[in-house]
Each structure stands twice: as C-alpha cells, then as structure tokens.
Image (cartoon, helix red, strand yellow):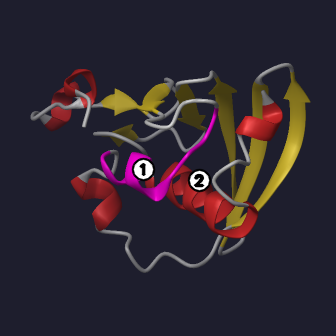
C-alpha cells in the first residue's frame, strides 16, 4: 500500500473528485485484484454487499477514459487517466474518502472481473 495515500484523520480525507493513484505492480496498464486490494478504505469495506454495477465507457481521449457506473438507479461518472504503471481515478460522487470510494472500487473490480486484467492496457 502506498504511504502517500494513507491518512488517519477523516478530516484529512480527500474528495472523491480528486484523482486517486493506484500503482500497477505489473506495469503496462495491467490492473490486478492484488493491486486494488491495497486501496480499500474502511468506508469502502462498509459497502461489501453493494449491488453489481453496470459499467460502460462513455468517452475516451488518448489515455483518459470516462466511465459510467450505475447501480440501484444512481449513475456516477468515473474518470481514469491511464499510465503504464499507474491509474489515476476520480468519481463524481463528491464524498470524503480515505482511498477509493466504493463506486470506483466496485467499477474497477467489475471491469477486471468481466473484461480481464488487461482492460486498461488495451486503452494505452
């Protein structure tokens, strides 16, 4: 887990609209479940039984993706900037979060489960 993304005081948590960085241990835009597991905050763990998201790609400009994540009738927009060794992820939910918000976490998890760990590599 990256120390730069770890905070202890909820007042110091970031807004979900600010990009959050995930280090890709395999590089080349490959996102694994192991990469994601270090980015689950306590706030996300509360939503362990969140219903399956419906994730779709809205737009792509170079290495930047805009994704729609809809669950229980509510739609959130995720923005993902892809680098060979990092993903920078933000969510429109506008919440204070320790790491990834549950909308971003479950959308990314859904993507690698349904489309494979090379999904972001194909967008580089």
**Residue placed under numbered mark 1 in the picture:** 36
Is residue 89 visible in the rendered image? The answer is yes
Judge whether residue 55 is colored magenta: no
- Quadrant where the image shows the C terminus: top right
Q: Do residues under tags 2 and 1 come within 8 Å of each other at their CB atoms?
A: yes
Q: Secondary structure at mark 1?
A: helix
Q: What is the magenta range?
A: 29-38
Residue nearest the viewer, comparing 27 with 6: 27
Number of numbered discs overlaid on the protein picture:
2
**Residue placed under numbered mark 2 in the picture:** 108
Q: Position of residue 81 (x, y in %)?
A: 66, 24
**Above/below status of 57 relative to 61:** below
Is residue 74 visible in the rendered image? The answer is no
* Residue drawn 24% across the image and 37% down it: 1
Q: Position of residue 113 (x, y in %)?
A: 63, 68
Q: Position of residue 83 (x, y in %)?
A: 63, 21
């Amino acid at each position: 887990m990256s120390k730069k993304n770890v905070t202890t005081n909820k007042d110091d948590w970031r807004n979900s609209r600010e990009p959050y960085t995930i280090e890709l241990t395999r590089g080349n835009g490959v996102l694994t479940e192991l990469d994601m597991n270090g980015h689950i905050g306590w706030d996300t763990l509360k939503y362990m039984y969140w219903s399956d998201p419906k994730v779709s790609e809205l737009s792509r400009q170079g290495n930047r993706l805009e994704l729609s994540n809809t669950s229980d009738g509510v739609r959130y927009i995720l923005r993902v900037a892809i680098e060979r060794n990092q993903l920078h992820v933000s969510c429109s939910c506008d919440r204070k979060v320790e790491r990834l918000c549950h909308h971003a976490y479950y959308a990314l998890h859904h993507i690698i489960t349904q489309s494979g760990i090379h999904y972001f590599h194909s967008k580089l």
